[in-house]
Structure formats: C-alpha cells, structure tokens
Amino acid sequence: MPRDIPALSHPSRNRQVLLTSRPAGVPQPGDFALAESDIPRPDPGQMLVRNIYLSADPAQRGWASAEANYSAPVPLGGPMRALAVAQVVESRAEGFERGDFVYGFFGWQDYASVAPDAVLHRIVEDVPLDAAGSLLGINGVTAYLALTKLGRPTVGDTLVVSTAAGSVGSFVGQIGASLGARTIGLTGDDDKVRRCIDSYGYAAAINYKTADLAAELKASAPGGVNVYYDNTGGTILDTVLRQMAVAGRVVQCGTASVASWMPTPTGPRNEREILTRRLVWSGFVIFDHMADYDAACTDLAAMWRAGTITYHSDISYGIDTAPGAIAALYSGANTGKKLIQIT
C-alpha cells in the first residue's frame, strides 16, 4: 500500500551517532559524536535497512550507562543502540523483501545490516509510519501489555498513571479508560495536565510539582487506588503507595525520577504498605513479552482505526539532533513520542 515516506536524502556514506563516553546518569549531547562509515552489505541471512525515523527512549539511559540493567551496555565507540522505523533496501533473509517496512534495533544511523532477530515488528498495519514508532512501537505495546497483563483494571477501578502525558503514559490512560477504569494522571506541567484531560481521556490530572499530591490523590480517589502504573519511582511512588486500596496492583515500568542508581538510593521503607494493603507489585520489561507483540499491534491498530486511541509525535529533523534527544526526554521537553526523522 502507499506509504507516507518522508522525502529523504540517500547518503553515499552511513552517518552514525556513536557513544563516546559512559554517562553518569542521563546521557548528554557531549557523550556522543557524529561519524561516517561505509554503507554495510548484508551477509547471507541478513537484510540492509534504511532508517526513516530514529527513536529516543528512556531505556537508552540504561543501555548507555554502566548501571545495573537488563541488557549489556552499548560498547564505547559504537553506534548508539536504538529502535527505528526503516525500509528494507536489500534482503538476503527469508521472509523479508525489498520495500518491506520494519521496526527494530537498527541503531542511530542511516543504514544497518541486520538479521531478522533485530526486527521487533514487520509493519503491515495501515497506520502512518510515525505511528509505527510510537503507537505500535515499544511505547504503545508496553502500555497495552503491562496494563492488561499486570495491572488488569476492571470497570470502576481507579487507575493512576505517572508521566501521564508521556510516550507510554498517554496510551495507558486511553487504554485504561477504554476498559472502564477511572483514570487519574500525574504530570509535572500545567499544559500536560490539560493535555491529559483534553487529548488522552483522563478523568482527572494532577501537577505533582505544584499540588499537595497526597491531598489531591485522596480527594480524587477517596476509595483508594486500585492500579498504579508507575513510570517514575522515587517520592511520587512513595506517596501513591500510601493511597493504594487493599489488593491493589502496582506496575513498575520505569524509574525516571531517580537521578542515579550508583550508589543505590534509599528511601522510606515500603514493606509494611505492601503487607497491610496486600499489594501485588510487578516489574515490566517489554522484551520479556515479545511473543505477544504482534497481537498487541493488531489490537492497537484496531483501536486507532475506531478512534478510541490517539497518538502524538514530537519529531525533530536531522540525525545531528539525536545526541540531545535522551536528555530532552528526561527534562520533560517532549510533547509526544520523540522521533528523529533523518533528512
């Protein structure tokens, strides 16, 4: 089918964003360098892809750092590990043809020669290509699978979401509302409070930077919080835990508010809250659930066609904008899913 392919240059060299220093906390632009290399050629069993949209994701903080994480750190001097929406230029891999659109681990670069296991999803749905990097990317699929598998909201439940206007939280709020939950969003900006309510269907939203969060939560959820979808950790998590209803579920999807895990920070002891409230507290990493990825994309695309879910992309232009993209995420500067269109 016709695709909304941006008018892109076809460089004769492969432009790359290399990780040159190990960041202490959030990666900064100075931790990267721009370089060029030859365009790779695919070996038997591989395909050459040309990136269209590069993704910036909070998980890249862990991939770049030496902090304990669920994957090995990116080698210094190598291209930054990243997800991307791409088109197959040449294929020597079974099941993939020239012209196919794919989403996977292709790195911050123009071209990548990869095996099929680098592909998370072959894009067959009739969605715009930027939606393939957001709604059908790890952000939308994480929101869908973590909420439905671990949060399990039912009609009438109160669902609270941190970073509620972010690239994951914005989808969690919409999916939760579609399941019949009453959704409350937490965010740190008045404009994002309005966006939560006007665009993402939250019943209420709270600016945790200016409000008395404990008091506002108690007023908004007098019966307690049944499901907390947490992307921040830290003091926000400590506050919400003390507002959980008995048998509540906590989905731990991120820890964006914690500046560093070296050394491990300490805070209030939460064991008593878990015990007395009989909470279930589960961690979610999307790569443990790849068997369900394509089915989630099918469901999310159907919701998009039906008009029950929307997405917003925050697109910058040019590969030279990539080095500052992760820091921008952690500062809250983005107004949607952060993508870099290569031009």
Image (tube, grey):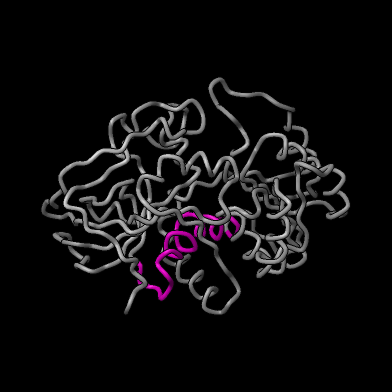
Q: Residue at position x 45%, y 48% from top?
A: 56
Q: Position of residue 257 (x, y in %)?
A: 63, 36
The N terminus - image quarter: bottom left
Q: Looking at this rendering, what residue extends furthest in the top direction?
A: 263
Q: Nearer the viewer, residue 15 or 299?
A: 15
- Per the image, is 26 magenta? no
Q: How many numbered callouts?
A: 0
Q: Nearer the viewer, residue 113 or 175?
A: 113
Relative side of 263 to 68, left or right: right
Q: Residue at position x 33%, y 65% from top?
A: 122
Relative side of 46 to 215, left or right: left
The C terminus - image quarter: bottom left
Q: Residue at position x 43%, y 72% from top?
A: 127
Q: Position of residue 202 (x, y in %)?
A: 72, 62
Q: Position of residue 272 (x, y in %)?
A: 77, 33
Relative side of 265 to 27, left or right: right
**Magenta stretch, residue numbers:** 123-148
- Per the image, is 126 magenta? yes
Reply above or below: 42 against 36.
below
Q: Residue at position x 34%, y 33% from top?
A: 19
Q: Position of residue 334 (x, y in %)?
A: 56, 50
Q: Nearer the viewer, residue 216 or 71?
A: 216
